[in-house]
Amino acid sequence: MKFLIAVKIILTLILAFSFAAANFAQTPPQLPPPKPLPRQAISAERPANYEKAIPTSATVNLKFCVSEGEVQLNGWGRDEIRVFVRNGREPMMKTLERDPKSEKAAWLLIGSQTDRDAVGSNCLAAQTIELDVPYAASVDISGRSAGIVIHAVRRAKVTIVEGSLRLRNLSAGVTAEVFQGDILVEASGGPIWLRSSTGNITAIDLKPGETGDEFHAKTNSGAISMQRVIHRQIEAGSIFGSVVFDGRFLPGGLYDFKTTNGSVRLRIPLATSGTIAAAYGFGSFQSDIPYKLLAENNTGGGRSIVVQFGTGDATVNITTASGSIAIERGQ
Amino acid sequence: MKTECLEIGQFQVYLDGELDSASITAFAIHLGECEKCAMAFEQAEAESLKVLSALGGELDTLVPTQRLWERISSEIQSDNRRQSFFGRLTRSIDGLISLEGVAAAAVAIVVVIFGLMHFYQEQPDVPTPSLASNSVASPEASPPSSGNLPLETSDDLPPISNRDFLASSALKDSEIRKIVSQRAVQSSSRISGPFRGEAQIPGEESYIKAIRGLERGIVAQPVSLSVSGRLSLERDLNLIDASIRKMRKVVRRNPQDLSARRILYAAYQDKIDILNSAVRRQDLMASIR
């Protein structure tokens, strides 16, 4: 036993002496003084206010991404784009394509000014970002955490991970996806495609730009509300939320409303003309408006009903696994 | 039929992903039926997300919960107990060598002083416990030995927080990722529940194939989903699975019921949409630096 202890002591002594010797012999080198960063890198990373403008064609395509910040994008009557960044990274404008006649930017990319060697984001990040673009511009925005408001441009395509999205006065269509947050689209036209994972979707006063334009809205757990949406083809589905349609079914229109657990509410005028085919599984069907019953299946779990209002011009399909379907009298 | 309301502890267990497949289904069904519980769950989830978001960078991606950390911790403890005397000695020496400068010398001097004290303490009546005997004793039975290095003594201390745990444990980042990935695979196999081991209904093959493909895609990159995203995804999938199960029963009972089929296929399509959405979210996160 003592022998083992002696071996332990000798080993620890050897270790102690070797460490002590190493410490004395090898003084740690002094750290060199920090190198001053290049001027450009400092300006790129320090939050500040910036304003830039560039002449563009009237129908310019604008593309940019936002890592965080509140974005306000407005259409205006000038053929130029102005960017104002408050408390953020310096914006950088890069012309990807020019208009062959005017030589002005026809496709523009806006990013943040970063040092060429620095590894960092090239998305805009600021407290607020304001953009003024021509009325006929199309915008393509992707973002991580952003609140975005777009007003009076031709077309918008927006994809953000989280945040809210408000679109108003867009004349030629909207494609928008927000993974966590609400979408509101007002007074716009053209094909509309809206998608949210956990947020609500609200669509008010929307119309098709040309024949065949469709309206699509889909959310997993939010609610969908449509008021005065006059597209002839409408598809709206929420898995766990409710779907509310407040408007008129147009003759020849195709309407498809789906939920898994949520309810479907249709607020339509008394003088509606449409055929409604509803499959409601374990749910229920109720109508305040008188209808003509065409077919009914009342087996548990597979309940369905086909009813006709007026002359049955529009075709309406409603599907829900366990939600309720309610048809109410509207204006 | 609605059963009694769930307790807050059960919400937490669910949010931590501790429930088995059957319990998750029961949980999801109950939430779908009981509005009070659904609201309470929403609140619990919101609080949980608030805490997770407050921790921010530490729990940036798919981070194991406290219970999982405890499990990992106990695994390390049992692993350490299994290690031989020479393994422990080698690790101790490695640990000592990895220390630098004055700190190392100080540690070594302390060890020498303890050794000398030990040498001159003659206690023939009490047998001196060896390191090897310490390594097989249960942590409750053996008090922390003063001669042990920090790596060994840390086993007796419960992890206070994830950061402390990371600092004190010998787990490498790759090992943590492996454990988390296994957890994600288990979670995903739970997702596939409704059709596992059951005969398929004609027409659902293509849906199931698409769903499996998407699930594989998600499992392949488990760490890129945020905690809140994963919780939300699991909750949505469990609820939709409950609906699919319900509708499958109806279709099985009456294969000619076209309405039931239509609802079932819609539910499958919803599941595909949910998974697609998760994949697109991953892609977007990856594209935005």
Image: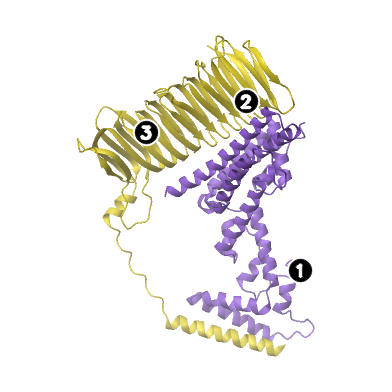
Chain colours: A yellow, B purple
Asked whether A311 or A156 is in front, the reply is A311
Q: Which residue is mark 1?
A: B141
Quadrant (top left, top right, bottom left, bottom right) of the N terminus of chain A: bottom right
Secondary structure category for the residue under label 3: strand
Please determine whether, in this image, residue A96 is positioned above or below residue B170: above
**Cα distance between the residues tagged 2 and 1:** 60 Å
Asked whether A22 or A152 is in front, the reply is A152
Residue B225 on image: x %, y %: 54, 48
Q: Which residue is mark 3?
A: A72
Q: Is residue B135 left or right of residue B162?
A: right
Can you name the residue that lies furthest to the left here? A102
**Res. A263 mark:** 2
**Cα distance between the residues tagged 3 and 2:** 34 Å
Secondary structure category for the residue under label 2: loop
Residue A204 on image: x %, y %: 46, 22
Asked whether A278 or B167 is in front, the reply is A278
Q: Amino acid at mark 2?
A: Ser
